[in-house]
Amino acid sequence: MALSGLDIYKHLPKTNCRECGFPTCLAFAMALAKKQATLDKCPYVTEEAKQKLESAALPPMRLIKIGTQEKILEIGNETVMFRHEEKFHHPTGIGFLLEDDLDENKFKGQIEQINKLKFERVGQEINVNLVAIKQTKDDDNLVNKVKIASQATDLAFILMSNSLNALRKSLEILKDKRPVIYSATKDNFEGFSKLAKEFNCNLVVSSDNLEILSDLTAKISSAGFSDIILDSGKKPLTKKISELTQLRRLALKKNYRPLGYPNIVFVEEDDPFREVSVAASLLAKYANIIILKSIDSWLALSLLTLRQNIYTDPQKPLQVESKVYPVGTPEEKSPLLITTNFSLTYYTVLSEVESSKIPSYILAVDTEGMSVLTAWAAEKFTAESISKTLEKQKAKEVVNHNQIVIPGYVAAMSGDLEEQSGWKVLVGPREAAGITNFLKSLKV
Ligand code: SF4
């Protein structure tokens, strides 16, 4: 049974030293009970207390590590149902299904296509994570395809086969890469879990029925293996979302250990538009790994963008450093545009300035990551904050003119800003899309 905050508190040092990041030992105990903190944050817990608190110290959903150190994919270890409570920690792994009956050239070509699915967005690289290789022919054919794939990509692997012989040979090729074996069922779990333990890799446990699934994971973990990923089978979308929600709730709210593992889902729709919309729904609630069929750049980019948005901290918007950024190779007479340091705003402005082909400077004002209108309403993007930033960033030494361009939405601050900063204020377009035409018409 889960320990209450007071049960945990009895075993803490009660010195309120704050090193765990909480104001008191009691506050830390309460956070531990709610699985919002981990016991290792307190350096003063005795060994005896650690043993007693073991169940409280375990995360409600196990952390699973797939792949090599350089390109490791970590999934699970989530602590909340909703993103407004706390950020989600480990982004959903996105991968592609390859069947081993493809001829070698086509197989290599598909891996090359998957390798290319990486993009830069708001200053971050976003990329896909996994290749799932499914056996459809004899054992040697799978082993051969695994050999080819291991040399062609450094993404993480899922090996899908019912043959222990084919899996063993494939794992020998992928040793040290901590792949995933797919999958243990009620008929084969003993052999599969032994193999996963021997090769120190991860194991998917499958059943359409949640009771059977939890019996299986309990048996496997009591035999000493816990690097488990759950697969509750293919279901209609609404049923699947409701089931994934139920799995997460049982793990996080009820601390139900047999289902306290991350999950995997396969999306195999014939229509790629349907495929991406199903995958997007599952990404939102609550898939930990999604395996797709269509290897398409637009499809991967849509899902990676959605993933990037879901797995950011809602209380800490993505921000760029507050400073003057040169775009192209600007000179002293080049325009100086003012915007906020919210990544999405900054990169939108940047991309419009780049496409204008007019070398310019952009000054990003620290608005704690808020966009223009929000920051203005919150009094973070004001005549005073812009003036101070111009001074702090020595803008007068960057350009030899006296003009700045502010976003059209904050035109109302022009007079005040001119007075406070001493710069001549030009009002730019309201939307970033108007920047190209605005810059072309500008006389500096
Ligand atoms: S670090 Fe340990 S002793 Fe210090 S306040 Fe936190 S729980 Fe208490």
Image (cartoon, grey):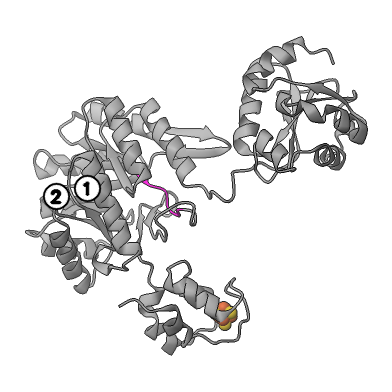
Picture quadrant where residue 439 is located: top right
Residue that numbered label 2 is attached to: 166
Query: What residue is shown at x 25% (from left), y 62% (from top)?
Result: 259
> Is 356 placed above or below 322 here?
above
Q: Which label was assigned to residue 115?
A: none
Query: What residue is shown at x 19% (from left), y 40% (from top)?
Result: 236
Q: Secondary structure at mark 1?
A: strand
Magenta stretch: residue 90 in it? Answer: yes
> Is 179 placed above or below 438 here?
below
Picture quadrant where residue 239 is located: top left
Relative image position of residue 402 (x, y in whole percent)? 90, 25
Distance from label 2 to label 1 (Cα)? 9 Å
Query: Dot 2 surroundings within 10 Å: few (below 14), some, or many (20 or more)?
Result: some
Residue that numbered label 1 is attached to: 159
Magenta stretch: residue 52 in it? Answer: no
Relative image position of residue 348 (x, y in whole percent)? 61, 28
Q: Secondary structure at mark 2?
A: helix
Residue at the extreme left: 187
Front in this rendered view, residue 51 or 327: 51
Principal SS element in the magenta part? Answer: loop
Report the span colored magenta: 88-93
- Mark closer to the observer (2, 1): 1
Q: Amino acid at mark 1?
A: Leu
Picture quadrant where residue 25 is located: bottom right
Relative image position of residue 5 (x, y in whole percent)? 45, 78
Would residue 282 be seen by someone viewing this image from the given angle?
Answer: yes
The answer to whether the residue bearing label 1 lies less than 8 angstroms from the nearest atom of ligand 1 is no
The answer to whether the residue bearing label 2 lies less than 8 angstroms from the nearest atom of ligand 1 is no
Front in this rendered view, residue 181 or 381: 381
Residue at the extreme top: 441
Query: Dot 1 surroundings within 10 Å: few (below 14), some, or many (20 or more)?
Result: many
